[in-house]
Structures are given as C-alpha cells and as structure tokens.
Amino acid sequence: MRRGGLVAFPTETVYGLGADVLNLNAVKKVFEAKGRPADNPLIVHVAPLIKLDEIIDEMPAKGQLLIESFWPGPLTLVVKKTILISDLVSGDLDTVAVRMPKNDVALALINTLGEAIVGPSANLSGRPSPTTAHHVYDDLRGKVDLILDAGPTEIGLESTVVDVTIDPPLILRRGGVTQESLERVIGTVEIGTREQLRRSPGTRYRHYAPRARVVLLPIGRAEEFARELQAHRQRREKVACIVHSPPLTALESGELFRVLPSSLTMFARYLFRTLRELDALGVDVILVEGVSEEGIGAAVMDRLRKAAQS
Ligand code: AMP
Ligand code: MG
C-alpha cells in the first residue's frame, strides 16, 4: 500500500478494497478495478491511531455520540471533509464518508500503514458484495496486489451510512446498524427519501445483483411462491430458490433450493454468498422469499429490492 498497491481486506461487514487515501494513483486504480463510476464516492476507513481531524473538518455532536456508541462497527458517517481528502475520494462532494471497521486485521492494516485507507466493497461494481476472500478473487483477480483472507465476514451486509451534516441526521443506506439503535443514542434519525438519496450517489446505481434475474416474493406465502416457480419452469428457465423453511415436496429440493435460516442475522450473513453460489450454477432466475423488516431485516429487504430491480 505504501507503494500504491491495492490490498483487499476483511471487515465485519464485507471485504473491502484498500488503498492509501493520500495516494491518488492508487485511489484511481480502485475505481478502475471495480469499474466504479467516478461520482460514487469511497468510504474512508480509519483505526485508533489515525488522526480524525486530518480527515474530518467538523464533527457534529450527534456524530460524536454515534462514534462513541458504534465505532468500531458497521456505521459510516458522512461529515464535512478537510482539504486533505481529494475530490477523487469524495466524488467531488465537500463531504466524506468515514468509518472504523470492527475487524482486527483491518485495524492492524490501517494502523501499520499509519494512514486512513479507502475501502469500497471489493467486488465488481453492481455485483453482490464479497463476504469471503474467494469472492474477491472471483471478481478482482489480476487487478489487486494482495487479498488478506480472514475467513467469511460476520455481518454479511454493508455498513449503515448516515449523513450527520444535517439535523435530524439522515440514513443514506441501511446496513449493519439499525435505525432503532441509532435513535436510542441521538433521537430522531430519518430515512432518506428517493429525492434526498440523490445526495448519496451510490444509491443511483444498480446494486447487489447476481447475473441471474432476482424475483422477490413476500414472506410466508407458499402457494404464491409455488405458482411463480411453476411459471418459470414452464418457460424452461433454470430456476433457483432461496426460502426460509425446508421444501415440502421432493420436486422442490436439490442444489437449486437453498434454505437460509429464518434468523435475520443469519439470513443477512449468508445472503450475498448464496446469491453468488446460485449464480455460479448458471441459473436464469433466483426466486427469493423476503424477510420481515425488523432490525437488520430492513437492510436485507433494501438489498433484495435493489437486486430485483433490473
Ligand atoms: P461502498 O463503498 O460500495 O460500500 O459504497 C459506499 C456508499 O457510501 C455509497 O452508497 C456511496 O454513495 C456512499 N457515500 C460515500 N461517500 C459519501 C458522501 N460523501 N456523501 C454521501 N454518500 C456517500
Ligand atoms: Mg459496494
């Protein structure tokens, strides 16, 4: 990284693609490797030895409270940036997104480098985020200098992004920290409306999508699910399914039928991995039974809706 190389690293959410935040050549290579549009800014990752005031121009009181409660952890704060943060990193905005990941390998990497690093998810732009080192290898081999493998990630979904430059703060992306837990610390937190989300450039792009078409179906409606499955099969499409409970008939089984635990944290942990696995089997369509929107379920449904919109 000191020589401007790219290093994929584990975090508690998904694998990140790391480069020295001050090395603009390296930052450019991050965009190129991912095929990421230049107006989609990168999250700057920090560790305890990094001086925040070199990155953040102004930290509002509510932002500070959130840091005390949730860092290290899956919470990204959008704040006013200093002049040390290049427009390349921030997608030409005057703000920067910052977080401290809760993963010893990531923290050691940043502390040892002695600089903050950019760390977008280490996938090709638009594909499901990588939750194992192997996913990174599948998407970026030949484009990264090193992949640090610390096993599968724990949360499996990206961080929550909150804009604290405004009051009440605004959730730009749902993720590992729920709205309720943020509100317990700082009171009202709003969820970005479509219009407001224009300010979070990443939300404009298709996301989290496997190559197969994703069809999202309501939770617990077995008959509707079976009808949809039947319809796709009649069209001779190769269909895979992700459901909560084991299939009732022998027809609905085999490797194309995946049962994901109904616990929301487990569902979140395995979702991207399962989408990638089913994709690798060359299916045309993936039918997914949705989850309830409680807790991290809201972030899961957000990802599923985006994956399903094509
Ligand atoms: P990723 O790096 O793939 O996890 O995506 C980062 C997300 O953070 C994207 O949705 C970005 O649009 C969002 N983001 C990063 N920086 C900013 C910023 N300065 N203002 C608003 N959103 C940001
Ligand atoms: Mg991403």
Image (cartoon, rainbow, N blue to C red):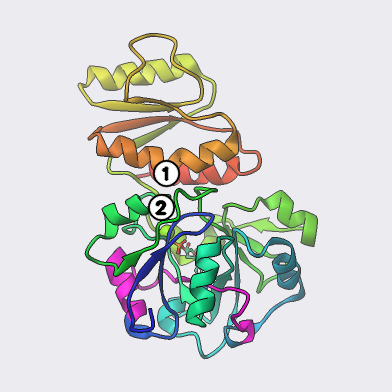
- The image quadrant that residue 169 belongs to is bottom right
Asked if one can make out residue 36 in the rendered structure from this viewpoint, the answer is no
- Dot 1, how many residues are within 10 Å of its Cα: few (below 14), some (14-19), or many (20+)? many
Q: Residue at x 59, y 81 (%)?
A: 50
Q: Quadrant of the C terminus?
A: top left
- The single residue placed furthest to the top in the displayed view is 249
Kind of element beneath mark 1: helix
- Dot 2, how many residues are within 10 Å of its Cα: few (below 14), some (14-19), or many (20+)? many
The magenta region covers 26-53
Q: Which residue is mark 1?
A: 272
Looking at marks 1 and 2 on the same chain, the residue that comes earlier in the sequence is marked by 2
Q: Kindly check if marks 1 and 2 are in contact, taking CB atoms under 8 A apart as contact.
A: yes
Q: Residue at x 38, y 58 (%)?
A: 205
Establish if 250 lies above or below 229. above
Amino acid at circle 1: Phe
Q: Residue at x 52, y 82 (%)?
A: 114
- The single residue placed furthest to the bottom in the displayed view is 83
Count numbered badges in the picture: 2
Establish if 237 lies above or below 140. above
Q: Is 188 on the left-hand or right-hand side of 40?
A: right
Kind of element beneath mark 2: loop
Q: Does the stretch in magenta take in 119? A: no
Looking at the rendered structure, which numbered label has been put on residue 129? 2
Q: Is mark 2 within 8 Å of ligand 2?
A: yes
